[in-house]
Image (cartoon, rainbow, N blue to C red):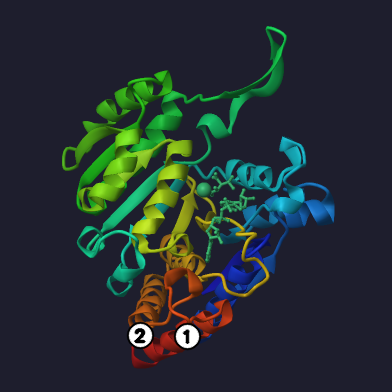
Amino acid sequence: MQKRIVILPGDGIGPEVTAAAERVLTEIGTAYGHEFEVKHAYLGGAAIDEYGTPLPQETIDACQQSDAVLLGAVGGPKWDSLPGDIRPEKGLLGLRKSLGLFANLRPVTIFDSLADASPLKDEVVQGVDLLIVRELTGGLYFGEPRERREVNGEETAVDTLIYSRSEIERIVRRGFELARERRGILTSVDKANVLESSRLWREVVEEVAGDYPEVTYSHMLVDNAAMQLIRNPKQFDVIVTENMFGDILSDEASMITGSLGMLPSASLSESGPGLFEPIHGSAPDIAGKGIANPLATLSSVVLMLAYTLEMPEEAKALQKAIDDVLKNGYRTADLTDQANVLSTDEMTEKVVEALKQTTATS
Ligand code: NAD
Ligand code: IPM
Ligand code: MN
């Protein structure tokens, strides 16, 4: 098959982990006879440096014309003092909005061989398999007004948490649909004891639930959900929640797997290209050292192959290669205290070798 993939390396460790993904894509293309037409474009700090804006029109156009987009990460200290509108993160938010990527899927899957990497107890972690479905184009991230103003003679800042019924309904439906294909349990996370937007969210969940009788659903307040994720993460199958809660809960949930460097994500629209990215950021503290864990990004490639490129066999082979590498005890620095750790490139080569073995025997 021929597919157009746009890679947005971004900033910090972004280019290091997308290089890993490109290496693996080349290998998959060779093994399965696909032609991946890969194009690089600028986003975030890199785009500010090159174009003076975090989201150049060229990047939007390239992404819209692609079959799938792969992103590293954006942001870093170099751009932290810029005004809100030309920050790197604003570029990512703008891209999500312009591609209509309202559904952000963040699977939290445990690799048995990695159970010891989690700060949580083995019995808490083993067998966890949950999916966070995060609303991605609404809520506090996009609500207006968002400004500084003077109130009672004092400098004051305002952000706005706003959701329409239709914005809630489409993400909640996606949550129910995904739960139906999995273990059939949906937890809707909100703060309905305080927030009006959460009370509307709950009402919509109640209405939509009628269309999915095979799914068992419940509501949970977000503070409790944060605690339950650590106490007993196995109780969860699909969690559906609003933008900001999903952002925070997914970084928290990554530690069940052992590292933030493990969690991939897929951002999907009703139709059109999806965007695939690790959930972690540009990690300025380790950028340039060549030690970042590439597995969150490689797992994002798994999601890209499965969800958008319609290559289930290839997705399975890459998933197995990642699993094999971890079973063989290979670790990047974030996954172990031991001295014997692999660099980003070494880890990537291990995955490529494992992939070669899988494709040779299939
Ligand atoms: P971060 O996710 O970049 O890093 C948090 C911690 O996790 C750091 O100690 C980092 O070294 C570690 N870490 C992250 N990814 C890792 C990997 N692959 N391998 C090993 N260790 C890894 O979060 P932060 O430090 O709060 O944010 C840094 C910058 O990244 C900020 O500018 C933020 O806005 C941006 N950010 C971007 C995205 C994105 O582009 N999707 C996501 C989150 C944060
Ligand atoms: C993420 C990041 C982004 C978010 C930032 C960089 C805008 O933290 O993808 O999780 O908050 O959505
Ligand atoms: Mn985040």
Give the structural element (helix, strand or loop) at label 1: helix
Q: Residue 289: x percent and y percent?
A: 65, 73
Inspect this view and state whether residue 128 appears. Answer: yes
Q: Residue 315: x percent and y percent?
A: 40, 72
Q: Residue 222: x percent and y percent?
A: 35, 34
Q: Are marks 2 and 1 in contact (CB under 8 Å)?
A: yes
Q: Residue 195: which disc?
A: none
Q: Which residue, given by chain and number where applicable, does mark 2 sit on? A: 328
Whether the residue carrying mark 2 lies under 8 Å from ligand 1 is answered with: no
Give the residue at the far top of this rendering: 152
Number of numbered markers: 2
Q: Which amino acid type is shown beneath numbered disc 1? A: Lys
Give the structural element (helix, strand or loop) at label 2: loop
Q: Residue 292: x percent and y percent?
A: 56, 70
Closer to the N terminus: mark 2 or mark 1?
Answer: 2
Inspect this view and state whether residue 44 appears. Answer: no
Distance of label 2 from label 1 (alpha carbons): 10 Å
Kindly identify the residue that appears in the image at 34 percent across and 61 percent down: 119
Nearest the eye: 262 or 51: 262
Q: Which amino acid type is shown beneath numbered disc 2? A: Asn
Q: Which residue, given by chain and number where applicable, does mark 1 sit on? A: 350
Kindly identify the residue that appears in the image at 60 percent across and 66 percent down: 5
Question: Which of the 4 image quarters holds residue 306?
Answer: bottom left
Left or right: 230 in relation to 20: left
Q: From what the image shows, is residue 314 above or below residue 131?
A: below
Kindly identify the residue that appears in the image at 63 percent across and 63 percent down: 14
